[in-house]
Image (spheres, grey):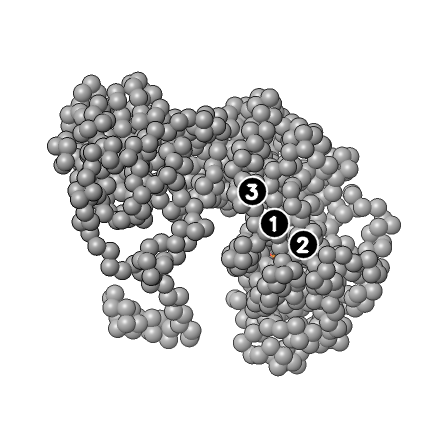
Amino acid sequence: MFNALTDRVVRELKKIVGEKNVICDPEKKIDYSHDEFSLSDIAHEPDVVVKSNSTQEVSRILSLANEEKIPVTPRGGATGLCGGCVPASGGIVLSLERMNRIVEVDRYNQMIVAEAGVMLMDFYPRVEEEGLFFPPHPGDETAMIGGVIATNAGGARAVKYGVVRNYIRGLEVVLPSGAVINLGGKLMKSSTGYNLLHLMIGSEGTLGIITKATIQLLPSPQMSRSLIIPYENLKDAIDTVPELLAKKIMPLAVEFIPKDVIQITEKFLRKRWPSTLGSTYLLIICDASTEEQMDKLSEQVAAICMERNALDVFVADNPSKQQQVLEIRSKIYEAIKAHTLEILDIAVPRAEIAQHVKRVQEVSQEYKIWLPTFGHAADGNVHTHIMKAVYEDGHIVPLPEEDWKNKLENVRRELYRDCKERGGVISGEHGIGIVKKPYLSYVLDEESISLMRGIKRTFDPNNILNPGKIFDL
Amino acid sequence: MNIFVFVKRVPDTESKIKINHETNSIIEEGLNFVLSPYDEYAVEEALQIREAKGGQVTVFSVGPDETRTILKKCLAMGADEAVLIKDDAGETFDALRTAKIISHALKTKYTEFDLLLFGKQSVGADSAQVPSMVAAMLDLPQVNVVTKLEIEGNSGTALREIEGAREKVTFMLPAVISAQKGLNEPRYETLKGIMAAKRKEIPVVTLEELGIQPDELAAGLELTKMESPPVKESGKIIEDEPSEAAKKLAEFLRQDAKVI
Ligand SMILES: Cc1cc2nc3c(=O)[nH]c(=O)nc-3n(C[C@H](O)[C@H](O)[C@H](O)COP(=O)(O)OP(=O)(O)OC[C@H]3O[C@@H](n4cnc5c(N)ncnc54)[C@H](O)[C@@H]3O)c2cc1C
C-alpha cells in the first residue's frame, strides 16, 4: 500500500528543509513515536522526522510524499491523548515546531495570525500583551496552534466561551497534493459555499496540514475570581450544575474534582488547596467587568451551591492565589499519570452528567478499579481516568498487569455504552486518533462514517495523510 | 489577648514589574496589589491564637486609601477590626519612617496590646527592618523570622530560623513577633467573610491625629536609582560528539564559569 522510504527520498527531503532538519537517528526519532497517551502499545517510530520552516516547504514535502506514496503524520506539541500524532504506518513525521511565528496582530479586526507551530505558552502572553483574550484553554500549554485546531480543543472555559472552533476565522492549509488553499479569512460571516474551514477544524491531520491560522480574540475580562466549594458528596456537587444553568448563571468555568486526587496533587506539588472539607469540590471561575457585577455573580452562585448542601464557599481572587488553585487543578494529570491507563473524554448533554458519573462509580465498584472522574461539569465533558490501581486509605495501590489488562477493555465498553444511551459522544475535545477508533461506531451511524470516508478520499486519494486515524478506509 | 497585626499592600508576586526611570518608581498601572504574603502568615497566626485563647485581632496598615482593599481582605479572613493609618507618601522604601509612624500610633492612640505581629519582611521593599525598629522604639522583646509560636499566660515561646538550625526563644508579653513562611497555612477567605468585610467600616487616622510632626519623618534614605535585575541569559548548548562535548564542558566550567 505504502512505499518504503528510500535514501533518495531522504536526500530530496534534505534538499527541501536542509540537512539538519531531517532526523534519521533512531535515538532522536524515538521522541517522535508517541504522544501523551499512556500506554506504549500504540507507539510507532517514524522512518524519518522532517521539520519544515515554511508553507512552501510543507507543500514540497507533501507533493513528494504523495508521489512516492509515503505516509505523512503532522505533529504539533504531541500533548494529544489518543495517539493522533503517532505515525502508525511509519513514514514521515512532519513536525511544525519551527513554524512558530506570530505573523500579525490586527487590532482593528481583533484577530491574530499565527503559524501552526506557535506554542500556547508563547501565544497567551502575546495575546495578553495586547489586552486581548483567547478563551479556549486546553490544560497543557506546550500544545501548538495547529494541534489545538486539528483536535478542536476545548478546556475549562468552554462553558461560557465555547471551543477552539468558535474562534478560528481563517486557515492556510496544504493539501496532500501539495496545493496550498486559503479557507475563510478575517471574516465574521460567510455563507459562501460549503464550509471547508470547519471541516478542517477537528480533522486530526487527516485532510490537510494547517500551516497558518487567523484567530478571533476578545477584549479581556476585567477581573476573575475562583470559588472553591466543598461538598459532602459528589451528587450534591454535580446536581448544583443544572441549577446554575437553569437560573441562567454563566460562569467562566465549572469543574468538579474529587478530593482524593486533590490530596494526591497537593502532596505532589507541595501546595495547598483552599479547603480540606467534604469529599468533592466544585471549582467555579467567574469573570466580570466591575466589582459589583463580580460580587453579585458570586453571591448568586454561592446561594445556589448552599441550597444544594455545599459546606462553604472559599474564594481565591488575586492572581497568585488563583494561580495556585489552577495549578493544582491542572497538575492532577501529572500527579496521577504514572498510574493512569487512559483518560476518557466523554461528552454528554449537560443535564445527563450526574447520571453518567453515577454510572462511572458503579462500574468502578463492579470492576474494583479506581476511576477518578473530573471534568468540565457545565459543558458535559467528563474525564474519567481509568487507572491501573485502586485507591485505599489515602494510598494508591497498583494492580497487577493481568488484572487491569482485562478490566480496561470492559470498563471502556461499559462507559461508552452509557455515553451512547445518554446521547453523548466518545470525544468532547481530545479527538479519536488511534485509541478511540474501535469505538467510533458506538456513537456514529454507518452512513455518517461512510460519508466521512468519502470526504477523506476526495482530499487524500492516496491516503498518505495521517493514515489509520479516526476510522479505517 | 489583644493582638495587633501590621500589614502592607504590595504588588502581587505574579505581576511583571515595570520601572518608570524618570520618577524612579514602579509603574502601578495594570498592577495587582495584594496583602504581602509574609503578613498573611501574621494575620493567620493572630486568628489562630484568638481562636484558641479568645481576644481580639486588629489589623493596621500604613498607606494611601487604596490600602483598604488589603484591610478588607484581613477582615474577610476573620480579623475583628482594621485601621488605616493614612499616609500618602507612596513607596519610600524608608523602613525608619514606617516604624516611626507605627510606634507613634502605639504610644499615643492604640496603647492596649499584648502581641504585635508582623510579616518578617514585605515583598517588594524586602528591608525586613520595621518589626525590629518598632520593638526598639517601644523597648519590647522581639523574635524575628518565627516558624512556630506558642503563647501561654503572659509569656511565649517561639522557634526562629537561624543559619543551619532553629533557635528557641522564650519571652514576656507584650512582644514583637515577625512571621516566616512555615508558621502556618493562611486560610482562604470565604465569600461570606468577603461580603461581611465589605459592609464593615474601616476607621482612618491621619498622621496629624497621631501627633506626628512632618520633620520627624524627614527621609532617612535617598533612592538614587531603580533597576530591573539583569535578564537571565539562555543556557549554553555544546553540540559535539559526547567525548568531545564532555571535554569542552569541563573546559568551560573551569575557565569561563570558574566553578571547578
Ligand atoms: C495535561 C493535559 C491536559 C489537557 N487538557 C486538555 C483540555 O483541557 N482540553 C483539550 O481539548 N485537550 C486537552 N489536552 C489534550 C491536548 O492538549 C489537545 O488535544 C491539544 O489540542 C493537542 O495539541 P498538540 O499541538 O499537542 O497536538 P498533537 O498531539 O501534536 O496532535 C494532535 C492531532 O493534531 C494533528 N496535528 C497537529 N498539528 C497539525 C497541523 N499543523 N495540521 C494538521 N494536523 C495537525 C496531529 O496529527 C494529531 O492528529 C490535554 C493534554 C494534556 C497532556
Horizontal side of residue A113 vs A268, given as left or right: right
Q: Mark 1 and 2 residues: CB-CB less than 8 Å, in contact?
A: yes
Q: Secondary structure at mark 3?
A: loop
Measured as percent of width and height from the top left, residue A341 is found at 59, 44
Foreground of the two, B152 or A361: B152
Q: Which residue is mark 1?
A: A135
Name which residue lies at 70% across and 67% down: A172
Q: Tell me the CA gap for discs 1 and 2.
A: 9 Å
The C terminus of chain A: image quadrant? bottom right
Measured as percent of width and height from the top left, residue A456 is found at 80, 61
> Which of the marked residues, 3 or 1, is nearer the chain's N terminus?
1
Chain ID at mark 2:
A
Name which residue lies at 53% across and 45% down: A222
- For disc 3, the neighbor class at 10 Å (few under 14, some 14 to 19, many from 20) is few
Measured as percent of width and height from the top left, residue A259 is found at 52, 32
Relative to residue B188, is residue B31 depicted above or below? Answer: below
Q: Which residue is mark 3?
A: A289
Q: Which residue is mark 2?
A: A167
Chain ID at mark 1:
A
- Please check whether the numbered discs 3 and 1 fall on a single chain: yes
Foreground tag (3 vs 1): 3
Horizontal side of residue A259 vs A91, given as left or right: left
Q: Tell me the CA gap for discs 2 and 3.
A: 21 Å
Foreground of the two, B115 or A253: B115
Q: Secondary structure at mark 1?
A: loop
Determine which quarter of the picture holds residue A79: bottom right
